Image (spheres, rainbow, N blue to C red):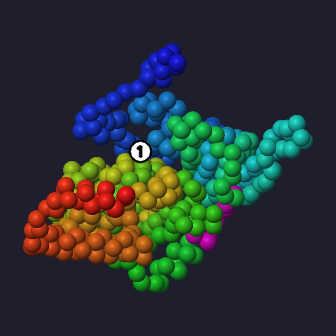
Amino acid sequence: TKETERRWAKDAQIFEYGSAANPDMKPIPVFVHPAVLHENGDTRIIPFDISETLDIESPCTSPNLMASFVRINVAEEITTHAPNATSQAFYIIRGSGTTTITKGNQDGDGKYAEKEETISWNTGDMFCVPVTRTEMIHSCVSAESYGGAAIYWIHDEPLMNYLGVTPNVKKFNPTLYKKSDMLAHVEEIRHKTGDCHKKNRLGVLLGNAKCAQTKTLSHVLWSLLNSIPGETIQRPHRHNSVALDLCVSAKPGVYTLMGKEINSDGDIIDPIRCDWAAGTVFVTPPGWWHSHHNGSDDVAWVLPIQDAGLFTHQRTLDIRFVDDELKLHHAGRIRGSAFSITNNAYIKMSKQTKRKMTMDEAKNIKLITAQKRSAPDAFATKRKIVKTSV
């Protein structure tokens, strides 16, 4: 009906492509959330909510993620609740304790919303849980300093809120990463050779068996435990995901430089400097080049958590290392994506395209050099068709 058409057309907008292809949106700022926030005070959640800065309706630290510190004084407990998140990651900055997923209330069939489970954790451990409808209870048993435990908590509820959806399928099982296991893998890599040493990168990606293709923490979350040896520099790199970086440990003289552009030597132009301090979080905007510098005599550790699980699935993470890009640029090439395109399907398509182009070129040559023939007598042709059809 006309009334229906009028209602449906009410919110329709049409834009000129050139001026609207890159809309003017609030940029992701470089923010630092210092460790002092979780080093004293009452048991509490300390959210990094910058939704007003980003002009986003619901609480968030980046468009897709919400990050917080959780402080738990010794012998106390606190609950966290993110029922609309597909993934929640918890990294233990300091302390020892337990976390329990509560059963919640029974439904009409006498079933509980969740299966009650409890794990123990210590400094340096990390665990990740899928969609959890009920509250999680975190208790501190002891802490090596500051009178309480500290947890770095990140979830993807902002993404679900933006999409207006509610996750109803657990895409993976609760997963625990012990500090001892992570460090054992780092040591194993240390004694091997490979590109990570050429790039001064010595770290481990934290994956899940249910994310075998993306090799990520969950279908949305991504995390890396990365080390920077003393007196070394990790040359610039960039990626399309926002990085919420936790400094795990560092002596004075460790910092990150970040900026939008690089020069012909691969150095960042007009960089912003973020100094590292244990237990501090800093935000790296998407697409920005950033390099890590360790001017101390000891190894520094950083744990970035990103929404790169989703980007990796979409083939849009596009992580690039500056020296690879400079090498291509000096060879007169600029690639559109860093996504690996060496698979057989791409090679086959490329060969088919080249073969078709060669055939088309050959046809064009024949068309140009072929002798012209006189046009047939249209009247004679018509008579022939009529005669044949009688």
Image location of residue 40, percent across then percent down = 57, 42
User: Quick check: 215 above or below 42?
Assistant: below
Whole-percent x and y of residue 105? 83, 38
In the image: residue 134, left or right of residue 370 = right
Tell me the residue at 37%/75% (across/down).
347
- Residue at 20 percent across and 67 percent down: it is 333
Quick one: 222 or 246, which is closer to the camera?
A: 222
Depth check: give the residue in front, 234 or 110: 110
Toward the viewer: 320 or 185? 320
Label 1 neighbourhood size at 10 Å, few (<14), some (14-19), many (20+)? some
Residue pushed farthest right? 110
Q: Secondary structure at mark 1?
A: strand
Segment tinted magenta in the rendering: 174-182
Three-letter amino acid code of the residue under disc 1: Val
Q: Is residue 180 magenta?
A: yes
Q: Which residue is mark 1?
A: 32
Image check: 388 left or right of 227?
Answer: left
Residue at image x 61%, y 59%? Answer: 126
